[in-house]
Image (cartoon, rainbow, N blue to C red):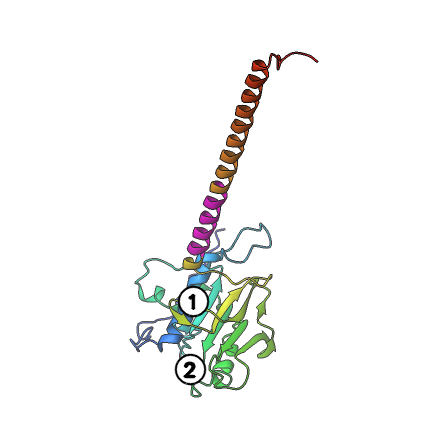
């Protein structure tokens, strides 16, 4: 007897607004979102698989809607990270242009909200909304301290509520840290990914600069080694010249320099 495989009907999304052409955020926020996204793709292979140790695929994006249901309005975080997912093709199909939980089969692991003013309700309404979506980690970055003295707030979902944690996300093998430096000509502070040893994940430009410095250091080392070898060769030649001159002088004095005493 053959078992019929049930057909799972996808929700009708014909009336769903997956993008509304709202202008992007302010310049610092836009750069912050891109820094979080770009450094992952430049320097992270994804969290290792517990079974094989091989990295797992991931999707990192900024300003993309998260739809948990067609009956509930989406939330649009400044950044999200989802592992074990791959964007579907064709990429411009409506169901593939945004993050539909039923298409990807899961919520993202982490979302980040960057605070630009006191109107976003990042620690209130948005926190409750992401908790309802069952997103494991929620991060609020407040570089201008609009919400208080702390710049970085990290939460982990436990039960139905978010509880404060240190900004280290064990299941991802990544953490977040406020970093004071320059990104694309704009001074910090910035929110950066970090590894367990505290090192920040470099951007593609930083990786290229580090590689250039490494290559330059290697070139200088090779040049120094070449100069050392040349100096050693000249020293040996000079020693041979002096030995020959001394032998010639001894012969003028009637002494055989190669004779035994």
Q: Residue at x 51, y 82 (%)?
A: 128
- Identify which residue, 132 or 124, lies in the foreground: 124
On residue 35, the disc is 1
Query: Bounds of the magenta span?
Result: 207-222
- Identify which residue, 226 or 12, lies in the foreground: 226
Q: Quadrant of residue 100?
A: bottom left
Q: Position of residue 198 (x, y in %)?
A: 58, 64
- Identify which residue, 145 or 225, lies in the foreground: 225
**198 to the left or right of 7:** right
Nearest to N terminus: mark 2 or mark 1 = 1
**139 to the left or right of 72:** right
Q: Residue furthest front?
A: 253
On residue 116, the disc is 2
Q: Position of residue 15 (x, y in %)?
A: 31, 75
- Identify which residue, 204 or 60, lies in the foreground: 204
Q: Residue furthest right?
A: 261
User: Is the stretch drawn in magenta largely helix, strand or loop?
Assistant: helix
Q: Is residue 66 magenta?
A: no
Q: Considering the image in quadrants, where does the C terminus appear?
A: top right
Q: Residue at x 34, y 71 (%)?
A: 13
Q: Position of residue 98 (x, y in %)?
A: 37, 68
Label 1 Cα crowd, 10 Å radius (few <14 / some 14-19 / many 20+): some
């Amino acid at each position: 007897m053959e078992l019929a495989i049930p057909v799972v009907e996808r929700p009708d999304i014909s009336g769903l607004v997956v993008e509304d052409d709202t202008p992007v955020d302010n310049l610092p926020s836009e750069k912050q979102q891109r820094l979080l996204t770009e450094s992952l793709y430049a320097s992270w292979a994804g969290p290792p698989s517990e079974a094989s140790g091989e990295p797992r695929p991931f999707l990192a994006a900024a300003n993309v809607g998260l739809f948990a249901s067609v009956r509930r309005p989406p939330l649009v975080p400044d950044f999200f990270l989802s592992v074990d997912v791959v964007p579907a093709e064709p990429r411009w199909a409506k169901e593939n242009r945004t993050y539909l939980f039923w298409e990807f089969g899961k919520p993202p692991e982490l979302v980040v909200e960057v605070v630009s003013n006191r109107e976003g309700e990042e620690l209130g309404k948005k926190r409750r909304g992401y908790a309802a979506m069952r997103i494991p980690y929620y991060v609020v970055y407040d570089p201008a301290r609009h919400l208080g003295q702390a710049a970085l707030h990290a939460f982990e979902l436990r039960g139905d509520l978010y509880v404060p944690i240190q900004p280290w996300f064990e299941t991802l093998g990544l953490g977040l840290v406020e970093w004071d430096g320059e990104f694309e000509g704009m001074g910090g502070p910035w929110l950066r990914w970090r590894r367990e040893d505290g090192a920040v994940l470099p951007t593609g430009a930083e990786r290229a600069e580090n590689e250039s410095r490494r290559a330059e250091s290697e070139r200088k080392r090779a040049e120094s080694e070449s100069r050392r070898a040349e100096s050693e060769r000249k020293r040996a030649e000079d020693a041979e010249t002096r030995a020959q001159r001394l032998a010639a002088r001894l012969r003028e004095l009637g002494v055989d320099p190669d004779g035994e005493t």
